[in-house]
Structures are given as C-alpha cells and as structure tokens.
C-alpha cells in the first residue's frame, strides 16, 4: 500500500497513540505521519521547546476536528512523575490504542574511556526509558484486552561492533523485552512490534557522530543512512501489517545474515576494523 493510499484511507481515524521520544527524529516523523493518517497523539519528551514545535507541526496536519495533539514534558525514566501526567491525558480523552516507544540515545566511545556510569546512563535511557511508559499503560491494555506496544531497538540490537559498548547491550535488552511481551500478551490481544533502524539522519545521530572514535566512524560509512521519514514510513507500514520485527533499509538482510551466517557479518566487521585501524595509523 502506498503512502498516498494509506493517507487517503485514514487507517488511524479515531485512534490515539502515546509517543515517548516523539519530539525529534524518528518519533517526530512517526507522530506527524500518524496524524496525517487520521490519528491523535500524545508526545512525550523532556524539552518543552521541541515538544511545542512538534505539536504545531502535527496541528497543521490534522484533517478532523476530533483529532487532538497533547504534549507532556517529562523524563520517561521517572515513573512517579510520568504516571499521573499520562493518567491526566487519559482522563481527558481516552485510553490510547497505541504506545510507540522511541526514547533512546547513543554514547559512542572507546571502551577504555567508559565508566560504569556511562553504561548505567545508556541502559537507563534506552531500556528503562521505554519500559516505564509500557508499565504505566499496560494495566489499561490488559483491562481492555486491546492495545499495541512498539519498541525501538537498532541493528545494533542483534549485532555489534567497536565503540558501542554502552549502546548495543541496551538495545539487545529491548529486543529481549519485546520477545517476552509478544508471547506473554497473546491471550490479551495486545500486539507487540520492535523497530530495528539502521543509521538514520536525526539530531541524535548528528550528536553521536561528534563523539565517534575514528575507527567507528570509518566502519559506519560502509552502511547507508535513511531519513527519519523513510524509517517512519516503514514503521507505520509494519504496524498496519502487525509485523513483530520491523526492519527498515538494510536491516532485513543484516538480521537474516546474522541469524543464518553470523560469522559472515562478524568477518565483515573485523575486516572493516582492521582497515580502519590502518587508515588511522593504529596497530592492528
């Protein structure tokens, strides 16, 4: 189904999605597309300025008076603060049909320069930042025996290479959480999907690139970079098709290869690493 066909049919008319991490990047692009397709959204992020900009963008895309765009400024790892804010939105509108988790960031650095706090911070934001909104909304989904939860992992949630020692484990953890919830929630008619983006041109990716060790930057150049809109298109299509694994760009072939011939992927990364070390004048 083309994007124009989807927009014409308004498949999310009357539906409501809560989108943690929806003020920038892939979350922002998804929020706007969901509104274009007839839905209402509640976008959660820390920065009020970015939230208001996204709210304005979404309001301009509404086609129905019944559509609403709510924003919540809150750290999604803070259960005590976030829970009453989400409940307030539910009380004023309704229980959402969708929870689209996009919270996350990458801190890329040489292993020897990392501290335990660096590992804790990446796990806290990337794992608990998606878990907390899920735990808040899960009782509502269980009660209604309806709902759709999505998580955002990464291609580095099923493979890894140098520089991503704090990031990749957090994305593996999200994959494991999604696998368990997909299975355990089957009797409750609650759908679960997980998105595995490749490198995507977002504000977060721009910040990530500033910190990358030279070898990591060279290895990353071997892959393609998608736009946030391209990822959002693939994501929404995957949700409409109720696919568990949503794989934009090269992610599909990478996951298939990692499962069937993992040494092939590892061999490629090893070769790229050796080449990058030579290029940067470091010993192999």
Image (tube, rainbow, N blue to C red):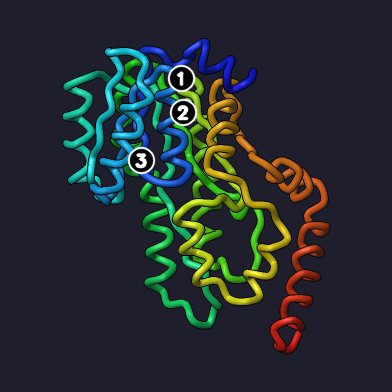
Is residue 9 shown above or below 111?
A: above
For residue 269, what is the image quadrant?
bottom right
Q: Which type of secondary structure does the marked residue at label 3 adopt?
A: strand
Is residue 232 shown above or below 62?
A: below
Mark 1 sits on what residue? 37
Image quarter of the C terminus: bottom right
Q: Earlier in the sequence, mark 2 or mark 3?
A: 3
Residue 33 numbered tag = 2
The answer to whether the residue labelled 2 contacts the one labelled 3, judged by CB atoms less than 8 Å apart, is no
Residue 253 numbered tag = none
Q: Which type of secondary structure does the marked residue at label 1 adopt?
A: loop
Residue 89 at x, y percent in the picture: 21, 28
Q: How far, Cα to Cα, is label 2 from label 3?
A: 15 Å
For residue 161, what is the image quadrant?
bottom right
The answer to whether the residue labelled 2 contacts the one labelled 1, judged by CB atoms less than 8 Å apart, is yes
For residue 274, what is the image quadrant?
bottom right
Q: Which type of secondary structure does the marked residue at label 2 adopt?
A: helix
Q: Nearer the viewer, mark 2 or mark 3?
A: 2
Is residue 193 shown above or below 280?
A: above
Residue that lies at the very extreme toward the top in this rendered image: 9
Mark 3 sits on what residue? 20
Frontmost residue, 252 versus 26? 26
Say whether residue 6 is left or right of residue 45: right
Frontmost residue, 28 versus 192? 28
């Amino acid at each position: 189904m083309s994007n124009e066909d989807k927009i014409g049919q308004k498949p999310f008319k009357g539906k409501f999605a809560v989108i943690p991490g929806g003020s920038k990047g892939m979350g922002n692009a998804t929020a706007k597309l969901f509104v274009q397709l007839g839905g209402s959204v509640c976008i959660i992020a820390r920065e009020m300025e970015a939230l208001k900009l996204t709210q304005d963008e979404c309001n301009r895309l509404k086609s129905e008076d019944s559509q609403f765009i709510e924003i919540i400024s809150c750290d999604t790892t803070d259960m005590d603060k976030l829970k009453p804010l989400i409940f307030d939105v539910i009380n004023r509108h309704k229980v959402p049909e969708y929870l689209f988790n996009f919270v996350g960031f990458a801190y890329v650095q040489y292993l020897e320069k990392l501290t335990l706090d660096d590992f804790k911070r990446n796990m806290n934001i990337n794992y608990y930042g998606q878990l907390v909104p899920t735990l808040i909304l899960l009782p509502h989904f269980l009660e209604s025996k309806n709902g759709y939860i999505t998580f955002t992992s990464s291609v580095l949630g099923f493979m890894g290479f140098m520089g991503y020692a704090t990031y990749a484990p957090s994305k593996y953890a999200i994959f494991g959480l999604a696998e368990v919830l997909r299975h355990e929630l089957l009797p409750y008619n609650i759908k679960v999907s997980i998105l595995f983006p490749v490198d995507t041109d977002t504000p977060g990716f721009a910040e990530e690139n500033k910190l990358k060790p030279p070898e990591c930057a060279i290895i990353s150049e071997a892959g393609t970079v998608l736009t946030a809109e391209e990822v959002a298109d693939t994501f929404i299509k995957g949700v409409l098709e109720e696919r568990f694994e949503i794989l934009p760009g090269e992610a599909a072939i990478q996951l298939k290869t990692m499962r069937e011939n993992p040494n092939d992927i590892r061999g490629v990364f090893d070769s790229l690493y050796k080449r990058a070390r030579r290029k940067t004048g470091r010993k192999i």
